[in-house]
Amino acid sequence: MKSGFIFGECVLLLKMIIDMNRIILVGNGFDKAHGMATTYQEFMDDYWKSVGNEIFDGSSFKSYQDEFIYFKIPGERYNLTFILPEYSSGITSYSKFKSLLDSCNTPSIEFVFLNKFFERLSETSLNNWVDVENEYYAALVEILKSHERNNSNEIPSLEKLNNDFTAVRRLLEEYLSKIEKTNAKILSVQDKILAPLRAQDIAHSHKMGLTKHIPQRIDKIDVEQKRLAKQNTELSDIYDIEDFRNGNIQKWVSELRAIEERGNRRQQIRKCMDMLPSFLSLPEEILLLTFNYTDTVERYIPASSQALLPHVECIYIHGRLKDKSNPIIFGYGDELDTNYKAIEDRNDNRYLEYIKSTGYHRTDGYRRLLEFAESGYFQIFIMGHSCGNSDRTLLNTLFEHSNCMSIKPFYHQISNEKDNYSDIVRNISRNFKDKQLMRERVVNQTYCEPLSKN
């Protein structure tokens, strides 16, 4: 009887605990905000610049071959007596290489792409990495449709596509490993990561949770204050926060504690939520879910944890550069697409080689993400992630999760008059099956801001 009573009390206590956390989706725009040359175009231009340095010295060509292209000239050198001023600085892009090649107008020069997928990327105007993954999936579907239409064996084409894509992925990893990096932090980005939970950002159906979360923060402050008192230490000695130094938090805690009935206390919190010290509405835990392969995000993980500050951890959901235990995942992740079922029905694992969901099983990152989502309510911050279709399966799982309180995009301010907030929201909408839920959870632009002003 007694043990049953204790168990019941524990269950009741667990139901009363309202953990409010944060998941931050970190994408390529995060690295770009830190000045890193990680865009798709910079990657492509780097390749053609390196090729240009091999084959063109400013006045003549020489032969060259790698796993991507074959370039052959008659003899050891091919002099270019017609060189125009625009070529004097060398070859810095595929368009410039192609233009120079076309200017030669001679059949004696041979040029072919050995990697057909890389040819597809070079010949197509793409803007983002998600476009590359979309191109791979489109090529995969083309092979599937060709097989269905011709009723013939298309396996050589499939193997060629996968081998070509493997080479592009390897080239990308080599490029990202060599680009210049810095350890500088952007303070405004750090402030956004550690920002308090705002009532204006939370979906209406979850706002009550915030009024229950704040009293828990008050209880934690009380416990921490008593612990430090035994060591003759003040909260302001440990937490270098203005509200502690000027006594604001202690004042609010005392006033709220004077309201003995918890229901009345929550009602008072709702009335004055916007005036409460922001420290009282910090999230309990923050998960930096990075889709990047670089380690830029790690500089925002505190060196040591403190009881009253959010616990911050990081998951490299798509792997890390040069990490055999967590290899990079580069492919496609839209299992909601209408063609995906047909791909699975082919019963050929080669079609699934670069589907992201199969790559997630190499580590425990995806399982840890699901455990975090299940552990309590969470708000989603989007920092530099386009929310494109190539991550649609994972994003749909988070966006429509019953614990998701809101989705707040930090957009890119392109100019004084232009930003990409609407583009992000349109991409977000494609990751929702329930559009009404999307409209409730996505924070409107009035309450959003740019990721960085840099």
Image (cartoon, rainbow, N blue to C red):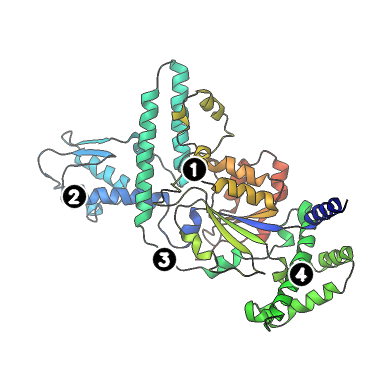
Q: Mark 3 points at which residue?
A: 182
**In terms of secondary structure, where does tag 3 sit?**
loop
Identify residue type, mark 1. Answer: Arg
Q: Nearer the viewer, residue 306 or 162?
A: 306
Q: Are marks 2 and 1 in contact (CB under 8 Å)?
A: no
Question: Mark 3 or 1, which is nearer the eye?
Answer: 1
Question: Please, what secondary structure does the residue beneath circle 2 have?
Answer: loop
Distance from label 3 to label 4 (Cα)? 38 Å
Q: What amino acid is labelled 4 in the image?
A: Ile
Foreground mark, 4 or 1, reads 1
**What's the amino acid at mark 3?**
Thr
Residue 196: image x %, image y %?
Answer: 68, 65
Nearer to us: label 2 or label 1: 1
Answer yes or no: is residue 42 visible: yes
Q: Tell me the SS state at disc 1.
A: helix
In this figure, which residue is indicated by the disc labeled 1?
Answer: 362
Q: Name the residue under label 4.
A: 218
Left or right of residue 124, residue 339 in this image = right
At x 63% / y 43%, what residue is drawn? 397
Of the numbered discs 3 and 1, the one sitting upstream in the chain is 3
How much space separates mark 4 and mark 1, taking CA atoms? 41 Å
